[in-house]
Amino acid sequence: MRVEKLILLFGLLGLTGCSATISEYISGQQSFSYEHLASSDELVRLGFQNSNYCLDQNQTCISYLSAEPLTDASKLDYKVTIDAAGKEEAIQLHLIRKNTGLYRGQVILIHGFRMTKEFMINSALYFRFLGFSVSIPDLLAHGESGGEIGYGVLDSQILDAVLDHLSGSNDCPTLVVGNSMGAVAATHLARKNDRVSGLILQAPMMIFDSASVNYINSYSPFMASFLPDYIIREGAVNA
């Protein structure tokens, strides 16, 4: 097995080089499957509408879900099972109206690397129950959005336009929630757009090269077994 690993390693090095291989590997990652989280029919039942925003006909388009507040609901129960590192985990949401306040405004929820907007449904339902309208975009090259992966930085440029489009003349406060790499996009968006009045960063991503080392160790242990961390870091910087 060790000989086979060395043969594969030398083959990769001969074709593209260590850091280039890592760079291509990271930028070529596909989104995790989300069908088990919510089908299109289930999203409609939950009150979500799927839309697209394009700067113009020749520009990359962003796909997003949006929904109105659940102000008429006396309680909210939601449960979904996800696969986390090969283990199934149940995520549950149980809210009773008398235990919550009622607020107003809009919340933009931004998912993390390889995730999609559907992974933020649970959080979106929570904010809708509190009285907020919600919008959940797919980051660039994730889910149903086009373009190339923007690592949260380039995403913020089009999300800035999306936020203006969604807000219109509405002067309600806007809260942006970012998970993992979405926290990077959320932070950059808050710097760009004065409409943002608050930020919630959920498990924000560490420095990208360090995050890439952890990611490859978790999801590609075979590759990590023969590539030193500094090569992975270099490839991440070049991605």
Image (tube, grey):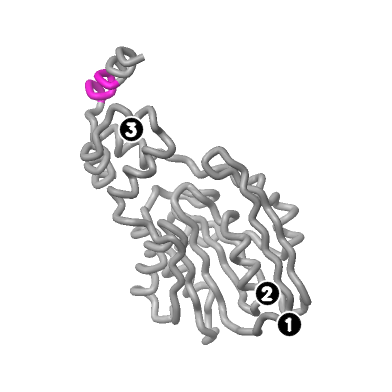
Which residue occupies 28% across, 21% down?
9
Residue assigned mark 3: 224
What residue did someone put label 1 on? 98
Q: Earlier in the sequence, mark 1 or mark 3?
A: 1
Q: Tell me the SS state at disc 2.
A: helix
Residue 67 point in image, percent of width and height: 65, 69
Question: In the rendered image, which quarter is residue 15 located in?
Answer: top left
As measured in the structure, the alpha-carbon distance from the residue carrying label 2 to the one carrying label 1 is 12 Å
Q: Which residues are magenta?
A: 9-15
Q: Secondary structure at mark 1?
A: helix
Q: Is residue 45 above or below residue 223?
A: below
Identify residue for label 2: 129
Quarter that holds the N terminus: top left
Asked if marks 2 and 1 touch (Cβ < 8 Å), the reply is no
Circle nearer the N terminus (2, 3): 2
**Residue in the image at 65% along x and 51% along y:** 90
Residue 227 within the segment the image draws in magenta: no
Could you tell me residue 235's position as x and y percent? 26, 40
Question: Residue at coordinates 62% horizontally, 48% vertically from top-left?
Answer: 89
Marks 1 and 3 in Cβ contact (< 8 Å):
no
Q: Position of residue 216 (x, y in %)?
A: 37, 38
- Taking the view exactly as shown, the residue that stands out farthest to the bottom is 171
The residue tagged with tag 3: helix, strand or loop?
helix
What secondary structure characterizes most of the magenta part?
A: helix
Which residue is depicted at the point 28% across and 23% down? 12
The quarter in which the C terminus is drawn is top left
Labels in figure, total: 3
Give the residue type at disc 3: Ala
Mark nearer the viewer, 2 or 1:
1
Q: Is residue 23 left or right of residue 138?
A: left
